[in-house]
Image: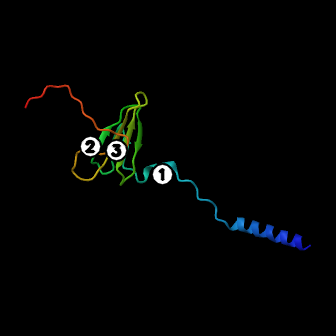
Amino acid sequence: MRALALGLALVAACSRARREAPPPAPPPSPITAAAVGQAGQVTDGRFETADGAFTIAVPPGWGVVVGHEGEALVLTLSSPTTGLRLRVLRVPGGDDAPRALPGCRWTFQDAGPYDE
């Protein structure tokens, strides 16, 4: 009898705990999640940063990934046919020297004539 009473008490406690738990939050709307905090947007085949400082045409059929506001990566464009990927980064300062990137070796080749 005592075991039966203990079992009923546990079942009642478990069912009450389930009723008191708040329902899970609904997933964010894809439209809201995509629009909030982006570094810019694509309109009529052109990407423009949120502040209007940079714009570039997006070739037809290319993949577009827009970065988040405040991050260095602003935009990634990728060609499905060639595999070419173009990344646009916003870096602070006026230094235009190549930036060190993991797995990237900066090289330069030119076969043209030079005059001194």
**Mark positioned earlier in the residue sequence (1 or 2):** 1
Residue at disc 1, secondary structure: helix
Residue 42 falls left or right of residue 23:
left
Q: Nearer the viewer, residue 19 or 112?
A: 112
Disc 1 crowd rating (10 Å Cα; few below 14, some 14-19, many 20+) is: few
Please name the colour scheme applied to the rendered image.
Answer: rainbow
> Which quadrant is home to the C terminus?
top left
Residue 113: quarter of image: top left
Q: Residue at x 48, y 51 (%)?
A: 33
Q: CA distance from mark 2 to mark 3?
A: 9 Å
Q: Is residue 73 above or below residue 22?
A: above
**Mark positioned earlier in the residue sequence (3 or 1):** 1
Q: Nearer the viewer, residue 11 or 50?
A: 11
The mark closer to the camera, 3 or 1, is: 3
At which x and y percent is residue 69?
37, 53
Residue 26 falls left or right of residue 110:
right
Q: CA distance from mark 3 to mark 1?
A: 29 Å
At which x and y percent is residue 8?
84, 69
Disc 2 crowd rating (10 Å Cα; few below 14, some 14-19, many 20+) is: few
Q: Nearer the viewer, residue 68 or 33?
A: 68
Query: Any mark on residue 101, and which?
Result: 3
> Which quadrant is home to the N terminus?
bottom right
Q: Residue at x 87, y 72 (%)?
A: 5
Q: Residue at x 35, y 55 (%)?
A: 70
Disc 3 crowd rating (10 Å Cα; few below 14, some 14-19, many 20+) is: few
Q: Are marks 2 and 3 in contact (CB under 8 Å)?
A: no
Residue corresponding to mark 2: 98
Q: What kind of residue is marked 3?
A: Leu
Residue 24 falls left or right of residue 52:
right
Q: CA distance from mark 1 to mark 2?
A: 33 Å
Residue corresponding to mark 1: 33
Residue at disc 3, secondary structure: loop
